[in-house]
Image: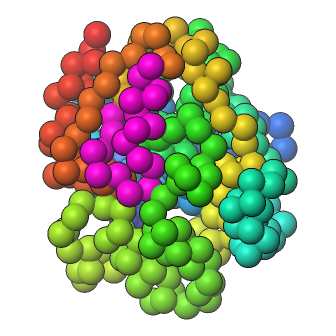
Amino acid sequence: MYHKKIFFLLIIFCIHVSSFEEGFAKNQSINIAYRDYGPINGTPVLLVTGLGAQLTLWPEFLIKDLQENNFRPIVFDNRDVGLSTRFSSQPSQTLNYLKYFLFIPINSEYTIEDMALDGIAVLDHLKIDSAHILGMSMGGMISQVLVAQHPKRVKSFTMISSTASTPNPFNGPKFKVTQQLLKRSAAKNDIEGRIDQSIKLFELIGTPGKNYDTPQFRKNMRAYIERAGDDGGFLRQMAAIIGSQNRKELLKTIITPTLIIHGDIDPLIKVKNAYSAERLIQSSELEIVEGMGHMLDEESYEKFKFRLINFLNR
């Protein structure tokens, strides 16, 4: 039963925090898997994750830090990933990227706007009137729409490593990163191959010099892959991103207090996107993190966590 709530301990990927409540919220015919880490009397923070990422990718250090500061972190699988409703179309990587480089619009099975409503469905299901919204990467794009179109549901907006622009060959990721992203779904039935690909991708977009090829990382990534099975949603979510219109005019309508956090060496979404977002959002402030790539590693988090907590407390 989708809405039955259960309590249990689960150690998966990098989340090792205590018990949580999990279940499914419903957006029309779409079921959205969520986890509510509590405490129930904490101020809710809805975390919106990035491209192809399951809710288990949110790191333990962030979840615990929020809880220790009287916040209630709530995470969810975006549609088409993890345990949320999956779709069945199979977009052509080659055709989509040909369209991408030729600036031809790409059709997608759902939109960024649809995905924003999934976040609202989680809040509705948990009977939360308003929450802090924290979105990272594609989650930041989804959150832009959520915050702009549902301002009464939002206490504040934190955007990490994201952009209002539709990625294109001039403002998109570096070529090596694009190549690795294209390989993401190639080894569908080869778990070790997918783990190897993940390590290579993390090395490209994470903290420079950090060793991701460790036994613990491989163990965690195996559990991560086994939780959700195939990676098909990655391409469909990518189509939603590339097929979307830029949100620059939308950002001008945001009046919610906003903190923009971005790494100065982000190879996936360039730092100039953060400066652009600050100019567009009238109530925003900007934190550029030295030495931070695109991943939310603990080394990078330590550099801005006090700014984040102080912002949320305001």
- Colour style of the rendered protein structure: rainbow
Q: Quadrant of the C terminus?
A: top left
Figure quadrant of residue 258: top left
In this image, 27 relative to 276: left or right?
right
Identify which residue is drawn at 49% across, 75% down: 180
Q: Is residue 278 magenta?
A: yes
Q: Is residue 142 magenta?
A: no
Compared with 124, 77 (above or below) is: below
- Residue 265, position in %: x, y? 29, 52
In this image, 75 relative to 1: left or right?
left
- Residue 162, position in %: x, y? 47, 41
- Residue 291, position in %: x, y? 19, 51
Identify which residue is drawn at 75% across, 49% down: 243
Identify which residue is drawn at 71% across, 59% down: 100
The answer to whether any part of residue 155 appears in the image is no
Identify which residue is drawn at 59% across, 87% down: 187
Give the magenta range: 261-279
Query: Which residue is more in the foreground, 278 or 184?
Result: 278
Query: Which residue is more in the foreground, 207 or 272?
Result: 272
- Residue 284, position in %: x, y? 39, 16
Figure quadrant of residue 115: top right
